[in-house]
Image (tube, rainbow, N blue to C red):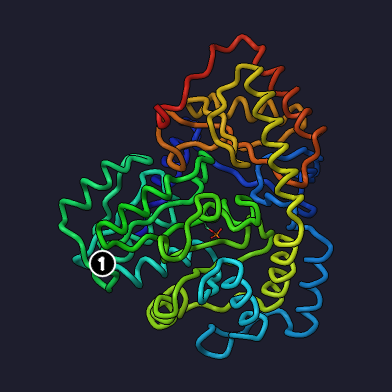
């Protein structure tokens, strides 16, 4: 039964009052550091286009060539007649890039997580997840019907206790427990303790799924993400999920792993089976961006330099920087009102940074989630620091530290 309209209005009013109301902005041009938002030019630090590929001429040209060859719509699901040579080639190239036998494209990362978790877990099984995991990993576990067990952020002893209690120890079979984690946590920018997670998974005979939406393309000398950084391969992390709408600058997602895993997903992942394949031209665009990810390590080097520049500048201003070394640089401000006020003040200075509030982040940890991109210049970062300096010198009390990192 739908709620009567008066109740909807009251609920919306409550969100407004609690500073939790969200609104969309309308962009009239491409993604990039300099956005045209609601008719106004803003210097933006909030997209996930970490390598600056979303508006790259080679990626655009590949999309156009793809559309000329394949048309626009894929017309059907992959298992019906929507799977093209463009999809097939991209899957092979992603398998090669991630060093795994196979990769399978999904239409979005959200759907990839729903699909892989519900294909591997179900009633009577358990899925173990970090408390700060992305909503799609949480929702995937809920949808699967398995019991979701959440452990405190990065708390390996707590995870080991939870796992030990259920008496695991089976090799990866359909009834093995599943541990799922973000590689890079999307609102904090910190990297999961992957080596320790791999050890626990191995000891307990559990599957380990790493969602590397924010690591792939960005971390590791060759952009292979948080697993490259940790020196882990398919033997330690059998299931790797990646998204294509972030560092790759296009759209879609994939799961990479062994032959049996991928065939199981093709047979059983409902969010793979019952949805239209992404447009082949988008797959062609992603092939072009994957070539750039591989061929242009300078993008990662430049990004790393910008991250260092921002962190040094923000620390010198006494801002509550965390120890994130990734392009996600949160400034945790506490309550939602404060995060909104800071975001509004930055916008008045021509800088766009969105305030991230509960329930996206835990209560009391509302924040500015700043993201850096290889498309930013040093001057852009300096402009951001100047605007933050003006705010930091206001009459405000010193922001509190992030309680999650205590
Ligand atoms: C963005 C994101 C997703 C979802 O990917 P989409 O392709 O945008 O649906 C999944 N996991 C994490 C960690 C993400 O940051």
Residue density around tag 1, few if under 14, some if 14–19, many if 20 or more, within 10 Å: many
Which image quadrant for residue 395? Answer: top right
Q: Quadrant of the C terminus?
A: top left
Q: Residue at x 31, y 57 (%)?
A: 201
Q: Residue at x 65, y 42 (%)?
A: 46
Identify whether 230 is placed above or below 173.
above
**For this rendering, which residue is in front, 392 or 127?**
127
Q: Residue at x 22, y 67 (%)?
A: 170
Identify whether 381 is placed above or below 61.
above
Indicate left or right for 245 with 147 as reference.
right
Measured as percent of width and height from the top left, residue 343 is found at 63, 30
Which image quadrant for residue 158? Answer: top left
Q: Quadrant of the N terminus?
A: bottom left
Measured as percent of width and height from the top left, residue 69 is found at 77, 85
Measured as percent of width and height from the top left, residue 231 is found at 50, 54
Judging from the image, what secondary structure is the residue with disc 1 in?
loop
Measured as percent of width and height from the top left, residue 281 is found at 71, 76
Which image quadrant for residue 30? Answer: bottom right
Identify whether 224 is placed above or below 400.
below
Indicate left or right for 91 with 71 as reference.
left
Q: Residue at x 78, y 38 (%)?
A: 42
Q: Is residue 38 visible?
A: no
Query: In the displayed image of the protein, which residue is found farthest to the top?
Result: 395
**For this rendering, which residue is in front, 95 or 336?**
95
Q: Is residue 168 visible?
A: yes
Identify whether 238 is placed above or below 10.
below
Query: In the displayed image of the protein, which residue is found farthest to the bottom?
Result: 81
Indicate left or right for 121 with 250 as reference.
left
Callout 1: CB less than 8 Å from ligand 1: no
Residue at mark 1: 176
């Amino acid at each position: 039964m739908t709620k009567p309209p008066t109740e909807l209005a009251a609920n919306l009013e409550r969100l407004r009052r609690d500073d939790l109301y969200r609104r969309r902005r309308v962009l009239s041009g491409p993604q990039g550091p300099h956005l045209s938002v609601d008719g106004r030019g803003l210097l933006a630090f909030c997209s996930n286009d970490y390598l600056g590929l979303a508006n790259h001429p080679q990626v655009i040209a590949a999309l156009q060539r793809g559309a000329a060859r394949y048309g626009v719509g894929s017309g059907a699901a992959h298992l019906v007649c929507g799977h093209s040579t463009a999809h097939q080639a991209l899957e092979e190239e992603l398998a090669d890039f991630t060093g795994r036998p196979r990769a399978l494209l999904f239409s979005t990362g959200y759907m990839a997580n729903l699909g892989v978790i519900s294909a591997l877990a179900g009633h009577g099984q358990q899925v173990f997840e970090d408390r700060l995991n992305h909503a799609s990993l949480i929702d995937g576990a809920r949808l699967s019907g398995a019991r979701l067990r959440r452990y405190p952020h990065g708390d390996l002893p707590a995870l080991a206790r939870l796992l030990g209690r259920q008496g695991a120890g089976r090799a990866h079979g359909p009834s093995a427990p599943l541990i799922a984690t973000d590689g890079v946590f999307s609102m904090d920018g910190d990297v999961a303790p992957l080596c320790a997670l791999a050890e626990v998974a191995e000891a307990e005979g559990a599957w380990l799924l790493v969602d590397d939406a924010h690591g792939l393309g960005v971390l590791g000398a060759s952009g292979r993400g948080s697993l490259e950084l940790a020196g882990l391969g398919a033997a330690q992390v059998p299931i790797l999920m990646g998204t294509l709408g972030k560092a790759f600058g296009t759209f879609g997602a994939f799961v990479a792993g062994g032959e049996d895993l991928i065939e199981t997903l093709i047979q059983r992942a409902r969010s793979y089976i019952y949805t239209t394949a992404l447009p082949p031209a988008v797959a062609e665009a992603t092939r072009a961006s994957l070539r750039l990810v591989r061929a242009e390590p300078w993008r990662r080097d430049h990004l790393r330099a910008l991250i260092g520049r921002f962190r040094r500048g923000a620390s010198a201003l006494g801002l509550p920087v965390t120890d994130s070394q990734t392009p996600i640089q949160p400034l945790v401000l506490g309550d939602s009102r404060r995060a909104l006020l800071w975001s509004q003040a930055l916008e008045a200075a021509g800088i766009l940074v969105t305030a991230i509030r509960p329930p996206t982040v835990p209560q009391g940890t509302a924040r500015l989630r700043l993201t850096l991109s290889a498309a930013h210049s040093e001057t852009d970062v300096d402009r951001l620091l100047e605007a933050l300096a003006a705010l930091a010198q206001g009459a405000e009390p010193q922001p509190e530290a992030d309680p999650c990192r205590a």
